[in-house]
Amino acid sequence: MDLTQALIVVVGSFGVGVLGGLLGVGGGVFLVPFLVFFDVATPKMAVAISLCCVICTSAAAALVTGRAGSEGLARLSTALKLEPALVAGAVLASLLGRRFDDGALLIGFGILILLVAALIRLRRRFSAVDDAPWSPTRLAAVMVLAFLSGGASGLFGVGGGVLVVPTLVLVGRWPLKAAAATSSLCLMTSAAAGAAVHHAHAPLPVDVVAAVMFGVLPGGALGARLQRIASEAVVEAVFTGLAVVVAGLSVWRGLQ
Amino acid sequence: MSGAPSPQAMDPGALRRITTLTALAAAFAGLVLLGAHFCPALATPGLVVLFGVPLVRNLAVVVWARGIDRWLGMLGALIVTVVVGGALWGSG
């Protein structure tokens, strides 16, 4: 990677980080298309790079939530319980993903983004909070969905938070802040497992990983600050619009 | 079986120490990966440190958490060691 390309990656990753932080969806949803559309990496490699980035953004987000008040406090016990399901999903999907061709992966990614956009629109409608201990049925449902979220993470390189948070809010009936804080604690393990499996198949480009990390992390911090002053309705509208565009481009690129 | 303990179940001080150590490990991984740009020999150690961030977190849980959390931390550390260690060993 030459200096010009490195600058493009850092600046682009910074923009991706701002968007991810502003919209509260992490960087992976926009990072993978950015790396593919700018020919920085193949779709499979972009997924692996994105997972490396998720490890760091998850650790940084956990640092913030570790200092939050009780409302936003991460529930470490539950994060630790979800981890085996997330890791199993991520490892299986990472192994499975190597068998898909790049086009199918991009089409699947486009469909996932639309699903995420729908979930983000739905989560406010089903935001009834029930802080009672989970029944075995609800716990089983959350574990199955955590397994699928880990799978989506390993297959498409998204943080999994875009699916874990709606799972904890819609099925677990948790407050949104506690769900987001907890997901940031448990995602780093599934991301590390997925990235390691990808690395075992094809060595990761360390220079690209470093450039992406140094763009996404400050961008994510800025985006999170912007989120505090932005209207939630505007943020949702922006995300829905971007999701449709990125999904369309991903499917179009996949069909090529 | 209870799946959702109250937010106060974890000692906030312990959680703060755990998340701070985890973030420091991630920052260290970033620095080593940046160093790999100038010294390619650092590439593999950088990735090992990066993939080891969850292991650091789980070991911190084992040290600072109490009760069932400590056992879950041990299980998590074992899972990370087996999966990540196996993948890195497989990659040669």
Image (cartoon, rainbow, N blue to C red):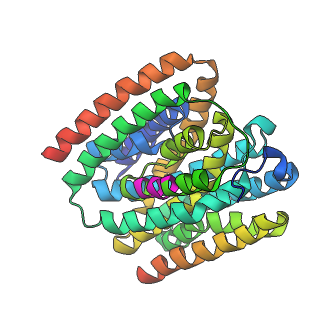
List x then y, in percent, for residue B13. 87, 51
Residue lying at 86% horizontally and 53% vertically, measured from the top left: B11
Count of numbered marks: 0
Residue B92: image location, x then y, percent: 42, 83
- Give percent across and percent down for residue A35: 34, 46
* Drawn side of residue A188 relative to residue B19, left or right: left
Q: Residue at x 59, y 29 (%)?
A: A127
Q: B24 and A32: which one is in front?
A: A32
Q: Main secondary structure of the magenta part?
A: helix
Compared with residue A64, is residue A146 higher up or lower down, i.e. above or below? below
Answer whether residue A208 is visible to the viewer in this image.
Answer: no
Residue at 58% over, 54% down: A137
Span colored in magenta? A145-152
Left or right: A98, with B23 as reference point: left
The C terminus of chain A lies in which quarter of the figure? top left
Give the residue at the far left of this rendering: A256
Queried whether the magenta region covers residue B57, the answer comes back as no
Quadrant where the N terminus of chain A sits is: bottom left
Please give left or right for residue A150 compared with residue B81 in the image: left
Q: Do we see residue A173 in this rendering?
A: yes
Q: Point out residue A18 in the picture as x, y percentages from the top left corner.
A: 51, 32
Closer to the camera in the image, A43 or B47:
A43
Q: Quadrant of residue A217?
A: top right
Seen from the viewer's position, the closer of residues A3 and A123 is: A123
